[in-house]
Amino acid sequence: MVKYRNGGFLLSTNIECIDVGKSYLGDGIKTNAVKNINLKFTKGEFISIVGPSGSGKSTLLSLLGTLDFPTSGKILYDGEEIVKKSKKTISDFRFEHIGFIFQQFHLLPTLTALENVLSPLFARKVSYNKIERAKEVLAQVGLSDKANSLPSQLSGGQQQRIAIARAIVHKPDWLLADEPTGNLDSETGDTIFELIQQLNQQEGCGVFFVTHDPKLATKANRTITMKDGIVISDKTGERIC
């Protein structure tokens, strides 16, 4: 079961998908984005999710991150079905446990790099000094000198590193990365991947890494391949560093 501390969530070490499906209805037509997903994940794994466009990769990531809910089956976090709880509980769980990195950086243009990293904490009570923690993660991604820069003053790779710092500012158990290198050149993309890999190794967070890049996918220690909304392969092996 998910453990609690002072009324909040303490940790989440396992995720299990049981017969998970997600469908959408538009213009009277039902579309099955994902179906019959049965998977188990353990904190600390580095998992790449690959497949052609429309295969359900991003949908699965949204479901795992509680941004969307299954229409069939269930997802358990340490044995608990979080999406059956109140909106506030789901939001608190997401804040405590899950960090998101997207292909689009989604930085707020009028905020500095430091303020963007701080933004998830603005309305939250935490046990640490928010500004000191934000500075710490900026240093972790190698951008201490850009703390007062606006996004427009940063390169694409620097903006993505700021987005990563924002995602890890509250030390999530799970880092969900949806095509984080898709808008970057190959050299910068490799740098971003290596940074996420370091976070996985040093912080112990689980990583879901959606990518179209087969070279990057092979560097994970587990690769899930999807097609037409189903998992067609789930391979675990030694990570290629």
Image (cartoon, helix red, strand yellow):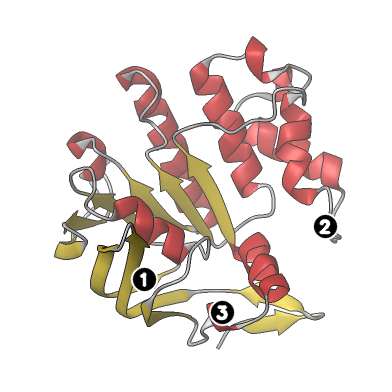
In this view, the residue in front, 28 or 195, is 28
Q: Where is residue 112 in the image (x, y as percent from the top left)?
A: 76, 24
Residue 62 lies in quadrant: bottom left
Q: Earlier in the sequence, mark 2 or mark 1?
A: 1
Q: Where is residue 101 in the image (x, y as percent from the top left)?
A: 51, 43
Q: In which quarter of the image is the C terminus?
A: top left
**Residue of label 1:** 41
Q: Where is residue 181 in the image (x, y as percent from the top left)?
A: 38, 31
Q: Earlier in the sequence, mark 3 or mark 2?
A: 3
- Numbered tag placed on residue 124 in the rendering: 2
Q: How crowded is mark 3: few (under 14 residues within 10 Å), some or many (20 or more)?
A: many
Where 96 sits versus 211, above or below? below
- Give the secondary structure at mark 3: helix
Residue 141 visible in the picture: no
Q: Where is residue 88 in the image (x, y as percent from the top left)?
A: 72, 71
Residue 180 visible in the picture: yes
Q: Distance between the residues labelled 2 and 1?
A: 28 Å
Is mark 3 in CB contact (under 8 Å) with mark 2?
Answer: no
Left or right for 194, reference 106: left
Amino acid bearing label 3: Ile
